[in-house]
Image: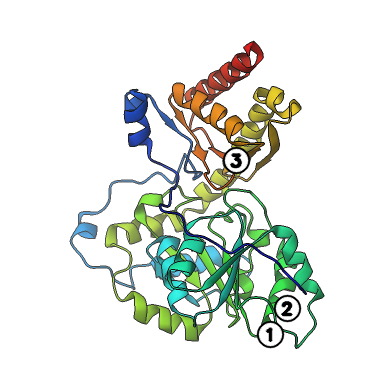
Amino acid sequence: MTFKLPRYTAPDELIHGGGIIEAAKRAGIPIEQWIDLSTGINPNGWPVPTLPASTWQRLPESNDGLEQAIQEYYSFDITNGLNNFVITAGSQSAIQLLPQLFPKGTIWIPEEGYSEHPYWWNFYQHKVFLYRPEDLNMLFQHKKGSPLPFDTLLIINPNNPTTQTYKKSFLEKLLNVIEVESKQLVIDEAFLDTQPEHSLLNRSNNKHLIILRSLGKFFGLAGIRCGVLFSHPSLLNTVRKHLGPWQVATPSRWVATQALNDTNWQKEATILLKHASCRLETLLQKSLQHHIQSNNIISLTRSDYFCSILCSDFEKQNIIHSQLLKHAILVRKFSDSFRLRFGLPKNESEWEKLTHALTNIRKSQKTE
């Protein structure tokens, strides 16, 4: 197999969703008038009640119920339950740590995806190459005994921002290839809560597999900074030594425990997210139909948390983005592609405001 993949070059600055305060200052529009659709997390997250006063006064303890809640929540198709995990300060903590745990080598990372992944592998002097989804299919032609073109393969499932989602059967087949050659597969499942059928958690004890999960996206609790790293015991022991105690604060642990145990809310949230994402896709298709017909938009895809638009060039991307800013709506604009990511509106008022803003974009284009 011969692959000619581009080598990753780190940007001067990593830009993420959010930044609503800065956007409001630049536009001169009071922040309370803004709708932030740039982050892609559940806009109607788990409703956090008043926390017990004791959570602010005690150091984190491992017997407070969080480990048990994690085991129950993530063991959806596992007979004996999962116990092979470490709790981290969001998946971000694990993303920064993993490159430090392996000898310097070659890693494949999606050409579009969460920008922290390639940045930290490159920071710790691994050779980072960017693959396209179709490149993975060629790995199935691999002949046993011949070298794979990487030491570690990273998959984001579903991908943020492209929405590319891999089926479990595909990933299992890929893991088998990687296992034969004693390489590593890292899967970022931060956005997979609403599609558990595609998860490889039931294989997470495999010594060639690492899985990252996050409570920030589905539960809408990005601020508690809580995530989970699943892997085999030998790697987890090393992870624990690097992380040390008190990764997640006591108030965050309390909130995470309650959210993970709230099965009724989880069922309802899954339904609402899927409905809202379909509604957003329909709205964008209708409102941006002129752009699509004139080939200004190459693709419009959706996940259960956001819709992703790939424009034909920077000018078309900037027109839509800047017009929305005039209406105090912030969506995520990607500098490494011509892509825009639309998160889900929180309520009917936000849906109406977004609809109005998109309609004005269509009108302004027709006028031009």
Q: Disc 1, disc 2: CB below 8 Å?
A: yes
Label drawn at residue 338: 3
Q: Nearer the viewer, residue 252 or 21?
A: 21
Label 2 sits on a secondary structure element that is: helix
Relative vertical location of residue 239 with respect to residue 335 in this rendering, above or below: below
Residue found at the very far bottom of the displayed protein: 145
State the SS at label 3.
loop
Question: Which residue does the numbered mark 1 point to in the structure image?
Answer: 181
Between label 1 and label 3, give the one nearer the viewer: 3
Decide if residue 78 is in sight here: no
Label 2 environment density (alpha carbons within 10 Å; few <14, some 14–19, many ≥20): some
Q: Quadrant of the C terminus?
A: top right
Q: Earlier in the sequence, mark 1 or mark 3?
A: 1
- What secondary structure is marked by label 1? loop
Residue at position x 58%, y 72% in the image: 107
* Marks 2 and 3, the one that precedes in the sequence: 2
x, y (%) of residue 12? Answer: 41, 53
Mark carried by residue 177: 2
Give the CA separation, mark 2 to mark 3. Answer: 34 Å
Residue farthest along the left direction in this orientation: 57
Quadrant of the drawing holding the N terminus = bottom right
One can see residue 91 in this view = yes
Residue 190's disc is none
The spot of residue 82 in percent (x, y) is: 53, 74
* Disc 3 residue type (three-letter): Phe
Asked whether, in this view, residue 363 is left or right of residue 85, the answer is: right
Point 37% across, 32% down: residue: 23
Q: Residues within 10 Å of mark 3 (few under 14, many from 20)?
A: some
Tell me which amino acid carries mark 2: Val
